[in-house]
Each structure stands twice: as C-alpha cells, then as structure tokens.
Image: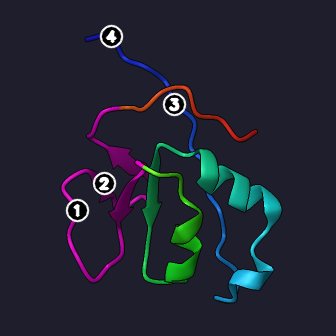
Amino acid sequence: MPERAGKVYLIGAGPGDPGLFTLKGKRCLEEADVVAYDALANPRLLLHAKSGAELIYVGKRGASTRFRRTRSGTCSWTGPVPGGSSCG
C-alpha cells in the first residue's frame, strides 16, 4: 500500500470554556476524519466532530494503540491515514 500524506492541525482547547473556542478550531473539528484529544479538552467540544469521525483519547490516563508519544516530544500514528479532509 502506498504511503499517503495527511494534514494534522493542533487546536488548543483554551481554558476549558467551549464559548472561547475559535471558529477555525470548530471548522477543523467539523471536517476532520480523526480527532485525537486529551483530558484537557472539554467533552462538549467533541460535539463539533463530524458524524463518523474517529475519536481517539490520547491522554495520560489511558493507553492508545495507535498514537504514541516519544521522549523527544514527537508523535507517531500507526493507523490508516484518512484522506480528503482539510480545514486550511
């Protein structure tokens, strides 16, 4: 299978108040095929994810088989790379 490149957007959840979330952040969630989130994200923000988007918890309270953080701070994804989504 050929490698496919995807886009990754890092969206800050702010101080936890969904009313302070940016419009661009909302648009990215609405268009994303995969949303990786942690314990700092207000669960109400995930309501903006499109229907069928894969929601993956990557917080420190649980383990994930697809998302790994390395000591250098880089991340790796071992699942399929979704295509066709861009909120630029």
The mark that comes first in sequence, 1 or 4, is 4
Using the numbered discs, state the Cα–Cα distance from disc 3 to disc 4 in whole angstroms: 13 Å
Residue 41 in sight here: no
Task: Classify residue 10 as left or right of residue 37.
Answer: right
Is 87 rendered above or below residue 35?
Answer: above
Task: Tell me which residue sits at (42%, 58%) in the image.
Answer: 72
Amino acid at circle 4:
Pro
Residue lying furthest top: 2
For label 4, the crowd category at 10 Å Cα-Cα, with few meaning under 14, some 14 to 19 and many 20 or more, is: few
The mark that comes first in sequence, 4 or 2, is 4
**Dot 3 lies on which element?**
loop
Q: Are marks 4 and 2 in contact (CB under 8 Å)?
A: no
* Front residue of this view, candidates 43 and 72: 43
Residue picked out by circle 3: 6
Task: Name the disc covering residue 64, or none.
Answer: 1
Using the numbered discs, state the Cα–Cα distance from disc 2 to disc 3 in whole angstroms: 15 Å
Residue picked out by circle 2: 67
Amino acid at circle 3:
Gly
Task: Classify residue 12 as left or right of residue 84.
Answer: right
Residue 15's x, y, as percent? 69, 89
Using the numbered discs, state the Cα–Cα distance from disc 2 to disc 1 in whole angstroms: 6 Å
**Dot 1 lies on which element?**
loop
Whether residue 58 is in magenta: the answer is yes
Q: State the extent of the magenta-drawn residues as a range.
A: 52-80
Task: Classify residue 35 as left or right of residue 11.
Answer: left
